[in-house]
Amino acid sequence: MIPELEKDKSNRKSLWSSTFSRLKAALVKTNKAVVSETSPENSKETTALDSAAVIDEEYLQELEDKLIRADLGLPTVNLVMDHLSKSSRSKTWTEYDVRSFLKNELSKMLAPANSHRLNIRDGVLNIILVVGVNGTGKTTSIGKLCHRLRGNGKKILIAAGDTFRAAAESQLEIWAQRAACDLVRLKDGSDPGAVVFQAIEKAYSENYDVLVIDTAGRLHNKANLMAELRKIQGVIDKNAGTANLEILLVLDASTGQNGIQQARVFSETCLLTGVILTKLDGTAKGGVIFSIANELKLPVKLVGLGEKIDDLQDFEPELFMEALFA
Ligand SMILES: Nc1nc2c(ncn2[C@@H]2O[C@H](COP(=O)(O)OP(=O)(O)O)[C@@H](O)[C@H]2O)c(=O)[nH]1
Ligand SMILES: [Mg+2]
């Protein structure tokens, strides 16, 4: 074996194992919610998937409750439970069988792997519009994402499209500095459409590879917010030329099924191409990822596992399932 190749292989292996172990650590609570959980009634550690379990009504009910608590959402839980009771009928299934069934069923739910890749093309301008409710992690995710793309040698411009909160723009400025990317920012209260227009002009005239646009997310002012997003989309449609467009919705995993409602609202206005699911660390509601796939049919492209600059990973369904069921 050529030493260089061997080294490359071992580098990839160690990268894979560190990615996996960080994902596994982040999913500890969701793992507990889906695979096992402390029962409140007798406060002893019970598991939905006990080894010598008999698959009876009571058992199925307990499993169903657990999946609901893990925030898979009713339609998704009903689908899984329906398949499970059909498949296990008149068979003697063990914990292992149910676990494999569940893992297989949930894996199938996550859309084909290639649509999970962030779509970045060479030789054209890539525009990534980032939308979502305030506090979900838009600005933080943009900082992390730009840092990563910079690491891949891309020339990146960020547009401060959340002009409503002065603090929001300063926060974005700090992230732009950390990620060593350029920023287009107009004075507070400016029209976000104007920011986006200037940013697209600059991106073309100075040959940027990627333009990432931050936006406001004041959902309590829904009509205004949607009008603003529509306007931003209009500016992009009119001026982006041959640019490759991604519109990513940021959802906070810890809000569970609320995120599904948010996605419905945003998809009425924006042609979403994917989801960034943040704050998977420290939540037991990571099961929401299956609702996103099953009910919204949207690919999760990136996952947030913490607040630091390198706490953003590509979403890889297989790795995710392994970590969830570990
Ligand atoms: N634990 C954790 N915190 C996150 C993650 N992503 C964002 N946050 C935090 O969530 C809060 C809101 O993030 P921000 O980017 O300001 O949200 P925005 O209002 O949508 O722009 C901040 O305190 C972030 O540090 C994540 O993946 N994990
Ligand atoms: Mg923000």
Image (tube, rainbow, N blue to C red):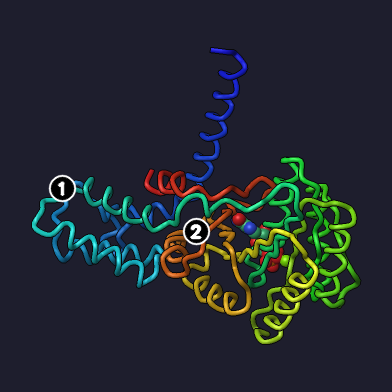
Q: Judge by depth and name the residue closer to the eye, 64 or 151.
A: 151
| 3D distance between C-alphas at marks 2 and 1 | 29 Å
| Residue identifier under label 2 | 283
**Amino acid type of the residue tagged 1 in the rendering:** Ala
Crowd band around label 2 with a 10 angstrom C-alpha radius: few (<14), some (14–19), many (20+):
many
Picture residue at 50% right of the left edge, 40% below the top:
20
Crowd band around label 1 with a 10 angstrom C-alpha radius: few (<14), some (14–19), many (20+):
few
| Residue identifier under label 1 | 52
Whether the residue under disc 2 has CB within 8 Å of ligand 1: no
**Amino acid type of the residue tagged 2 in the rendering:** Thr
User: Does 246 appear above or below 221?
Assistant: above
Secondary structure category for the residue under label 1: loop
- Per the rendering, the mark at residue 176 is none
Q: Are marks 2 and 1 in contact (CB under 8 Å)?
A: no
Quick check: which quadrant has ligand 2? bottom right
Image quarter in which the C terminus is found? top left
Picture residue at 46% right of the left edge, 60% below the top:
289
Give how far across and how far down residue 44 sits, in percent: 28, 54
Q: Is residue 116 left or right of residue 228?
A: left
**Residue 46 seen by the camera:** no
Q: Earlier in the sequence, mark 2 or mark 1?
A: 1
